[in-house]
Image (cartoon, coloured by chain):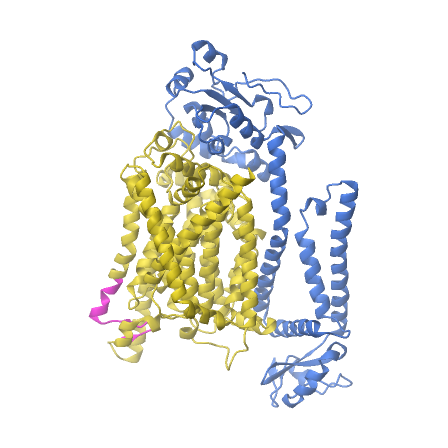
Chain colours: A blue, B yellow
Amino acid sequence: MRRLPSGVCTLQSPRAAEKPRAGGGGLAALPVRGMRRCKRRLGSLARSSTVALPIEASKVITYRNHRFVAKWMHWGAGMAAVAAVLYLCVGWAVAAQGELSLPARAGRHVGWPLLGAVTAGLIWAMTSAGPIGRIRRRLRRVGLRFTILWRKAGWRRRLVIAALIAHVLIGLGYWLEVPWTLHNVKDELRRASVAPVRRFRGDWAANYPFFVRKVIAETPPEARILYRGGWEGMVLSYDVFPRRVFALPDDLQNLAGRWHKHAWLEMRTGGRSNADADADLYWTAASRFEPIPYEEFVRRYAIDYVVAFDESRPSECGIFPVGAARSEERLSEVPPPRRDGARPFQRRAIKDGAFATETGS
Amino acid sequence: MKSDMNDSVWCTAGVLLVLWFSGYPLARLLLPDGGRRAADFWFRAGASLLLGCLLFVGLLYFPLALGARWTTTYWTAVWAIHVGLALAAVWLLIRDRRRWSETCQNTTQGALVAVVATGIILLSAAAVGGNLGLLGYDARAIYGLKGKVLAEQRAVGGDDFHDVHRLHFMPGYPLLVPILEAQVFLCSGKSNDEGLPLLFWGFLTVIAFLWASCAARYDPGAAGWLTFFCVLTPWLWKFSEGAGLSGSADVVLAAYLAAAAICAADVSPGADGRYALLCGLMLAGAMGVKQEGTLWSGLVLTTLALTRLTTRRRSRVASRRSGSNEACVAGKGTSLGAGLRRRPLVDFGIVLLPILIMFVLLRLTHGSIPRSPLYRSYLAALSWDWLTRCVGRVPQIASFTASECVNNVWGFGWGALFLSLLLKRRYPLSTEAMSLRLLTMLGAASYLAVFVVTPYPLTYHLFTAFRRLMFHLYPVAMLVLLEQLTATGVVADLGRVFCFRNPPQGDTVRSPEDATSFQRRRDSHVDAA
């Protein structure tokens, strides 16, 4: 950038700024007194090869208008906007007709195309060379001012400006996705609470919300429950409140040694999380939890039900009443825990997607 | 079911409103006048909910600390106090209507558009919060369960907290959030959690108000758009695990920490002592939310000490240059006179007082709760044997940090912060800005150190906790970003391009006093000297 003696600030190279432009648009380096004419000619800015814009009252900044780039930006943005709108409309219509679960129908990618359409439309309007109204004139002015700022700025400042714009676009994209995301989450929860199992990565998996509803339906509010299973027990304790949920010391010890063992974590890390087993071994070796025999535990805590849940083994999930009188006979019906950590409840296999576990009652 | 949900949503909204208004008289009392009116207004609006919640929870903590339970009379009395305070707040707001309507009148059209846009984002978040139950694992297993137990038992002395065989995830956690949730369960008479995230939406709005307050200090003309920019961070109003609307306590802690950081930046030798008190109260609130609050109390005190030392060094250099050994010098007007030399210790004392009270309350309440077998001690992790195993963790933490900083859920906030630090400032760093930067750096360093020594499996801990901890830092980091963007002139440039700011009159370079430091005006001692 260079300040000329006439009070004109130009963004051209010093040599280019000093030379009068041969056959240019007539606004090579516009002095302050030319501002009015400049304003009058705002409508034909895109057609001129070099334009000048009043940025501040005391300055006129000139820059070379790359007509070629502007033209391609204009057409590119227009086509992108049309493509985004078409993606939304056609995707929606096809999915609605064919009952397909296309991305647009499922709502996973609605916000981003919508944002893309709006942004591309704005760029199209900013670079438009046709007759313009008040709003498009404003938009074009913003575009031109932004171009000037971009050219004036150094690379570091450009990076910051790009980062700020990226932040706003990402935020708006997520925000536009919110209604569909909310709908999807609620729909998923609803489906998980009415069906006992679902297909997950080619296998059957138990639906936790359905299981919680089952526990609530089949146990009285004052029930005392012994939980056998994984990390879902902590949430189960909240979901089935005011029923009190207990765990055997052996099971707690088992859990304490399995902080690294989560299906979702293995899936996200591709199994690399299992390398952290050493940390669990180190800390569980340092502190053992005092075991209590199963029968004694059931008697001491007046357990009414044994509840087993393992998402990856739906056939082993179930609710087992210990017995109203907690007699020795009924107690013996519920198998005691196994030392190897495996689930003790072996049930029938799932047939036709039905929840095949027995309640024991 | 639908009517249950409506009851729950209305109860949540009612609890939130009463607590918010009840804090306003306290905020009026504790926050001195003297800065920019808009900045003070937004800070008071944000601090009101934090102070209201702190007073409420503090009053309900006392019986729990003494091993008693909330009797109906006591519980009703606490509510009566808060309803009274809320009514007083309404009266105060009506009385001050001219003052805050002037704040609104001074806004330009661009600022109004920004306020409306920010309002739309926040209201849509409220709509989402009102439509959801608690979704997160921690929100249910740690905080929600405690809330339900408290609503039923009204005490922490029972087996629900003390029996290690009961499935209760981390029973020793602080109870600020569970006590608030318990109020919703108690008021609605049901344990339905639909609409409960609305409670957390309040704290999310507090963070937005705190950003608005600081943006109004840095650049009043662009405050609305700067707040809009910050509020667009998706993690604030997402509802996946640990996010703002998931029901996790992290958003509450982040709000308390942001308020504490702003107050700590305002604590200076000659400033009003009420900033120090407010800072201490906010840190006490943070301690009541999560255990990380205790760590942050230490960090804030360290920051105060380091900032004070730097200021003194600057003053000495300035006095040496001026050739005078006495009187007022330097950016903050620190005096080398004997009368003012004792003030820093007094400030520390004022900050420490609420922290110590909260510490004693927490020890009395949770000290006797036995450790769950799932819990692992960080102090035990500081052994040589364990530390030698942790050396190899650094590359994994570094790569995870890098990937998280550019994760879309933060927008590009972290990236913008790091890139903005490359720009050259147009005026030197004020003490206030230095304090915020120091706190951010100390917070980031200590959190990264926690991951290096963590006794839990590293991959699991990174995936479940890293983003939460970043959330604690995020509001303060955004304050640093806003200050840096203002100081480097990026806000002024973008303001001219997008016309959201009045054209600058004269030079765009502003003095540090004008841009960030308002303590000089408040600093009556130095002025008098």
Q: Nearer the viewer, residue B422 or B360?
A: B360
Q: Taking A232 as reference, is B293 above or below it? A: below
Q: Taking A45 as reference, is B465 above or below it? A: above
Percent x, y of residue B148: 42, 36
- Residue A322 falls left or right of residue B367: right
Q: Quadrant of the C terminus of chain B?
A: bottom left
- Residue B310 falls left or right of residue B116: left
Percent x, y of residue B66: 26, 39
Q: Is residue B376 visible?
A: no
Question: Seen from this angle, which residue lies furthest left?
Answer: B338
Percent x, y of residue A339: 47, 19
Q: Is residue B414 visible?
A: yes
- Residue B91 falls left or right of residue A146: left
Which residue is pictured at 31% across the width and 78% down the height? B321
Q: Taking B35 as reference, is A37 above or below it? A: below
On the image, which quarter does residue B453 sit in?
top left
Percent x, y of residue A167: 58, 59
Q: Nearer the viewer, residue B367 or B439?
A: B367
- Residue B2 falls left or right of residue B182: right
Which residue is pictured at 38% across the width and 45% down the height? B176
Q: Quadrant of the N terminus of chain B?
A: top right
Instruction: Write the start and end of the magenta stretch as one range.
Output: B328-344
What is the tally of numbered marks visible in this picture?
A: 0
Is B329 magenta? The answer is yes
